[in-house]
Amino acid sequence: MLHTSFFKKYCLLAILVCVQGGLSAQTPTHEPPCLFDALYPPGTLQAAEARIGAALGQKKVAGTLENNNDIRIIPVVAHIIHNGGSENISKAQIERQIEILNEDYGKLPGTPGDGAGVDTRVRFCLAKKDPQGRCTDGIVRLKTTLTTHQPVDRATLKNLSFWDNTRYLNMYVVKSISGNVGGYSSFPHSPPDEDGLVVRHNLFGDNGTAAVSGGRTTTHEVGHWFGLYHTFNGGCGQDTCADGDYVCDTPPVADPNFACNLNANSCGNDNPNLPDQVRNYMDYTPDECKNMFTQGQKDRITAALDTVRTLIWSPDNLVATGCDSAYIAPPVCPVAADFVTLTPQVCLGGKVYFIDRSLNSATSWQWFFPGGTPASSVLQNPTVTYDSLGTFFVTLIAANINGSDTLFLENYINVTEPGTGQSLPFSANFDDGIFPPTGAEIYNPDLGITWELDSAAAHSAPYSARIDNLVNINYGTRDEIVLPFLDLSTSNPDSAILLTFWWAYARSDPNYSDELIVQISKDCGVNYTNILTLSGNALVTGPTQTTPFIPTAAQWKKATVNLFQYKTEQYVKIRFVNVTDGGNRLYLDDIQINGGLVTATDEPGQYGLPLRLFPNPAFDLVQVQADGGWDKPMHIRVFDSVGRLLRDYGAGAASTLDLTGLPNGLFVVKIESAGRIASFRLVKQK
């Protein structure tokens, strides 16, 4: 069984909750969901809880809690993120999930949702109008490999397709979610561009690819979107109303229930002592077991709709989205052309993947790409290479048997000259107090906690870079230090090229683990490849503590990444990515790319070092000291600063090099032994 921290790192947004869901009664085992109590310590949700709690208090004083029977309708848009497989689910499966939501939230008689609970008076409607007022079936389909979903890339889903979250509930259906998670959702008062929920296709509905599911994963996640906690939030707690799930009429539950054991009673501090409410949608029991929301949960939902989510169910918005009872849909919604690319800015020679997101079942596509190759295409999702500099428009004509529609986007693609990056060696030690370093950038997508200059701790005084994950509650957010473009071809062509840096990190809880990811791009920052990932115990350098971590000199570790495969690239981007998980402070310092010149103190043991040249600067004689397992014989050569061979001492070189006759200046001494190579800068003087 995977431990809690594995699942925690896949939970994001201001509130993110994961649930496996959809387990059949015959399934003998279950996979651990995200543990809500471990994810969100007390105080995490103060902003949302203050507003919801205030609304509940006002309703209690006014005596309106029991009398609120207005139906609230929530317009929904389903974004189907697929790659041409079975995850591209049918319209019937999508519509069935909406029916299940209405059965569950409406306690519809004669359906699996007709349990012992209450009608929440909330209903759901697939939107009939898009944000531009065009007729739609409320479904957007996009073909992309992002259907294999990493929740840390949540923002990318929003870049693909996102409708105004104050007017629509955005649901994303994907093929898979890392960690085999079933789904996750935002909580009221989350950042707007993180609002919505993500669910696996085989748990969305109860037909098609979800035939063995009951569709209650989505019911559960929508509950979080409305402001409901797990019934087991906080365990048994002390006060069955004022803590736990903040709902008086859900009995306290010590731990999640994965079986439909109606006799389960994990807490005895409630009065009267009631069994666990295993049929509640906000537990982890199998779909066929769950069938109820309580009056207290209904009250919280109503309070959230009255305070945070006020526009989405308003009469004006129902008219705007086509979910009002007076809306009359046309016999057929005409096709509406639409497309997107995640890379509208590329370097010369870059490739752009265009994703069709036309509404209402287009069956043919005609694209026009001035400046691109091909210049036109009839594919639904073409890839175009841009070999000309400039800014270019893109046109799409989408059609079906009912007609066509044209979308023209002017100045949509910007193609720039790659240029040449900064020569090596590169160093960023932050000690000049300039942050970010000259030419570098900080990427802070949520405009919240991010990388900053720190003077309290450094590997080399006085400064380091730091991000404070201890106070960063926007779980899953990626904050980046992006180095300037670099020319790795300026390294010594015969030597190793190494990226080194020092870091320090501690956890705030053994179950929490932030991530540090180092990535490289050789296509002007369009696509990145992971070259190092540190998380869990591999990231930790100091003791677990709930107070802010300030490392001692002994609590810094050095990382080394071999960039040999990129050493011919003249225009690369390297970035350091922090993925927050509510851990503790993470520090970076002394980032260096050595240009292929390994010094005698670099990485003892990695290349059989230490090796040492002395004296340096030298006059005519230089001693070569080799130990630590550096095998003999050694082949030693001396080059000038532009790489011309000046002297070859052969494969059995002596430990004393005679430089007599060589001019004064900077040399490169290259030493080879048993397939290993090291290079040193050496200065000869009079």
Image: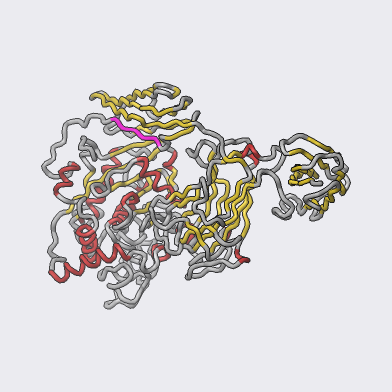
Q: How many marks?
A: 0
Residue sitting at x 27%, y 48%: 165
**Residue 361 as seen in the image, left or right of residue 592:** left
Residue sitting at x 52%, y 36%: 523
The answer to whether one can see residue 512 in this image is yes
- From the viewer's side, name the closer residue of 71 and 647: 647
Q: Percent x, y for residue 380?
A: 37, 28
| Residue that sits furthest to the left in the current view | 326
Q: Percent x, y for residue 353?
A: 43, 32
Q: Specify whether residue 338 is painted magenta.
A: yes
Magenta span: predominant SS is: loop
Q: Give the residues drawn in magenta, as a range.
A: 337-341
**Residue 644 as seen in the image, left or right of residue 515:** right
- From the viewer's side, name the closer residue of 443 and 460: 460
Q: Percent x, y for residue 330?
A: 16, 32
The answer to whether one can see residue 529 in this image is no
